Image: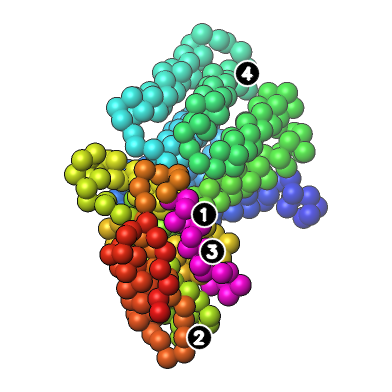
Amino acid sequence: MKAVDLLFGDLASLLSHVIVLVIVTLMFVISLRLFLDRRKKGYMSMTFSVIFVGIHYLLKIYVLLTALDTSLTAYVLLMLKIVSFVLLNFGVYQLYNRTHRKQYIFFYGLIIMGFVVSILHFSVPQMYSGTPQQVRLLQDIALELYVFVLIFLCFYMIPPYIGQQAKYQWALTVFFLIQTCHLINVYMYGNEQIWLTLAGNLLPIVFYFLLFIMLFDRVVELMQAIYNSSITDGLTRLYNRKFFYNRVSQYVGRHLPISILFSDIDNFKKLNDTKGHQMGDDVLKQVAQIMKEEAEECGIAGRYGGEEMVVMVTDPSVKMDAFAERVRSRIEKETIVTASIGYSKYKNGVSAEELIKQADEAMYKAKTTGKNKVVKYA
């Protein structure tokens, strides 16, 4: 009997509500911390939405423990379900998008419409004179069906504008199953179908777990984005000078056979002055893409400053003269500019700073002896 209660009885429902509360509490902590750190509306909306979810499930626990099953409590629970569902989806939308007036009108309009539909809850007793149970069922049916409207609206309107679309659509599908199982069990089986009851206890855990994973993954995405912005150049997306120098220092500190390629775009100032900074930025991006593609298999590429770009070649089998010439040739053929390139190879006793300086000096020699050429540091 105890095993049955744990799966199908009030104890199972209580356990389900408690597990959901734990998941929602974790979501609240994460979203609140994000809001306090970043002050974005999306995190504030997510924080408020999980507060409403928490209130909803606390009331469900209270009703379950006190057997306070009245028309008013049923109405409050339904409205809390609608409000928390809309706010949750609004929060998910705001995690990935800036919100304007029309988005606020849409989501808050859905909540207002829920209250409009709820007028039927209070009108049915005056319009219908059936048994108390029949009246209760009719009072709730409009709001229950309105939940399906909300699910379909969110399913088709939100996914194109957010990341993690698959997880979000799976979560909405689970919520649809929750609502379907609930209505079939209540209106067809009088809450006596044990397998539908089991589904009603398990599926909410799955739904909120999926939302928790979405929120957690969003935190990871933000942390990754912050890290990437701290080590890369905003325009070219190559590694920045600090990160590049640190990586060279790591390899030199371990006495590994690396080489440094140092390039400078020829006549870049003249290009900026005659064709504008936008053209200059476009050229920087094109050259950077060439550097990134060539370095992908054998090292890393970085922007050292202005129009200077560098590559650390970590593969000792790479022939640097051929590698540097390939980079120079591609820049000449694939862009409207040329580049002067110098390179140097690591020798024992040379520091990271000296190694980069040697490649820089070789580049300067290429620049002052005709440009658009490759020079090895001697």
Q: How is the image coloured?
A: rainbow
Q: CA distance from mark 2 to mark 3?
A: 26 Å
- In the drawing, what numbered circle is on residue 236? none
> Which residue bears the numbered disc 2?
254
- In the drawing, what numbered circle is on residue 293? 1
The residue at the point 70 percent across, 26 percent down is: 184
Look at the numbered discs 2 and 3 and tell me whether their residues touch, using CB distance below 8 Å: no
Looking at the rendered image, the disc whose residue lies closer to the viewer, 4 or 1, is 1
The magenta span reads: 314-331
* 83 displayed left or right of 130: left
Element type where label 1 sits in the image: helix
Looking at the rendered image, the disc whose residue lies closer to the viewer, 1 or 3, is 3
Amino acid carrying label 2: it is Arg
Percent x, y for residue 3?
78, 54
Mark toward the start of the polypeptide (2 vs 1): 2
Q: CA distance from mark 4 to mark 2?
A: 80 Å
The residue at the point 45 percent across, 21 percent down is: 118
Mark toward the start of the polypeptide (4 vs 2): 4
The residue at the point 73 percent across, 42 percent down is: 198
Mark toward the start of the polypeptide (4 vs 3): 4
Q: Is residue 212 above or below residue 346?
A: above
Percent x, y for residue 65?
57, 48
> Which residue bears the numbered disc 3?
322
